Amino acid sequence: MQSLIVGKPYEFIPPRYSGFWHRLVRGIIPGKLRKEYGVAKIECIGAEKLEASLAAGHGIIIAPNHCRPCDPMVLDSLAAAVGRPFHIVASWHVFMMSRVQRFLLPRLGGFSVHREGLDRESLKCAVNVIADAAHPLVIFPEGIITRANDRLAEFMDGTAFLARAAAKQRKEGKVVVHPVFIRYTFAGDLEKAVLPVLSEIEQRLSWQPRPDTPLVDRITAIGEALLGLKEMEYFGSARTGTISERLIALQDRILSPLEEQWTSGRNDGGPMARVKRLRTAMLPELLGRASADEQRKALWRQFADLYLVQQLHCYPDGYLSDPTPERLLETIERYEEDLTGTSRPHFPIRAEIVVGDAIEVSSGKDRSQETDPLTASIRGSLEALCEITRPNHPCLP
């Protein structure tokens, strides 16, 4: 489950920013990005908009899309461009993945948040960082890594909540949100990069590799096979209908029994809201069980089911109807990551960080509207940035 769930009580990890450690790590980041993520070049566009907000003394939230694991490292190029370190909110499990990360992340401005519960210390820290206006605070509104650079997942409500809380706390000056879109483009030979991965996945499915089949057809066939296998696991047989219909049905098949058990059947909201609600209900029970307890083992299986729903949610409807090199690459990377827990880098990838206009935040919320106006404004700006940064690649045959 990518270590998303930590089987011990949560402990807030505050930021302990260190200029020394930041300078040291900043010298390492370019090589790490090239070696582990294939990122060869980073360009910042519109950094002057963020510089203007910094010069005005505003409390600042940076709200980026989150399509790749390396996004936080890529964003450090924007911090360097404007000459101001960022603080960043990260899930607690990220700090617990290794001792090195637990040591370094706070010294680079990171602090933890408990996604499965009410984390008052993290909320207070985030509000203080924004209100003090010394460091911009990075919050990823999607809350998960989507591996979909051309689509946005549903937004969590934390960004707007923290922005309004900070605006209320500030005695003078404004709080603003800068939507930031990170656009990745692949500049290499796509077939040379992905054919070995496709062949390996086909062999895992007990298929003979099909090098003469068009790339899009191979990728689509693998996706349908993987979906069919999961349907056989949860339904007893492969289903019919469109891919979108089948994905929705499978997610509901997994979530509904868990909701009956843990949340009295409550099933409102999108898939990720439902997953978060279930994790929040289940985690206290997990922490209260002995390691050899059969119920604890059953709980881990249920957490694995929730992670599967998150994986399914990250396959956007009709994504390969416009099969650009980037969409094909992302889909193959997602296959490999879902099957093996990791995906290999593909070089070279170019990253553009595009800063959107500042969105001023008021301390009050208009409760007459069904959709949170600030969340809608952030999403609308990111969707516009997604469109204007879309590469003009010809569709593959």
Image: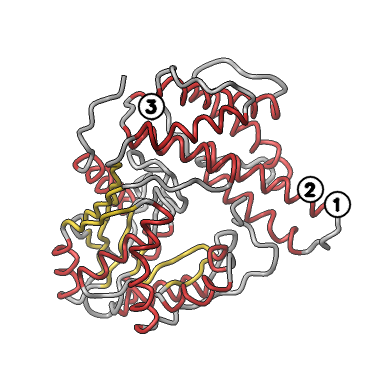
Q: Amino acid at mark 1?
A: Glu
Q: Which residue is mark 3?
A: 320
Residue mark closest to the camera, 3 vs 2: 3
Q: Which residue is mark 1?
A: 294
Determine whether the residue tagged by mark 2 lies in a helix, strand or loop.
helix
Q: CA distance from mark 2 to mark 1?
A: 6 Å
Residue mark closest to the camera, 3 vs 1: 3
Q: Amino acid at mark 3?
A: Leu
Locate residue 128: give its quadrant: bottom left
Which mark, residue 298? 2
Locate residue 5: give its quadrant: bottom right
Residue drawn 30% across the image and 62% down it: 62
Name the quarter where the C terminus is drawn: top left
Circles 2 and 1, Cβ within 8 Å, touching? The answer is yes
Which residue sits furthest right? 293
Determine whether the residue tagged by mark 1 lies in a helix, strand or loop.
helix
Q: Amino acid at mark 2?
A: Ala
Give the crowd class for mark 2: few <14, some 14-19, many >=20 residues within 10 Å: few
Q: CA distance from mark 3 to mark 1?
A: 42 Å
Give the crowd class for mark 1: few <14, some 14-19, many >=20 residues within 10 Å: few
Which mark, residue 104? none
Where does the image place residue 314, in percent across and percent down from the top left? 47, 39
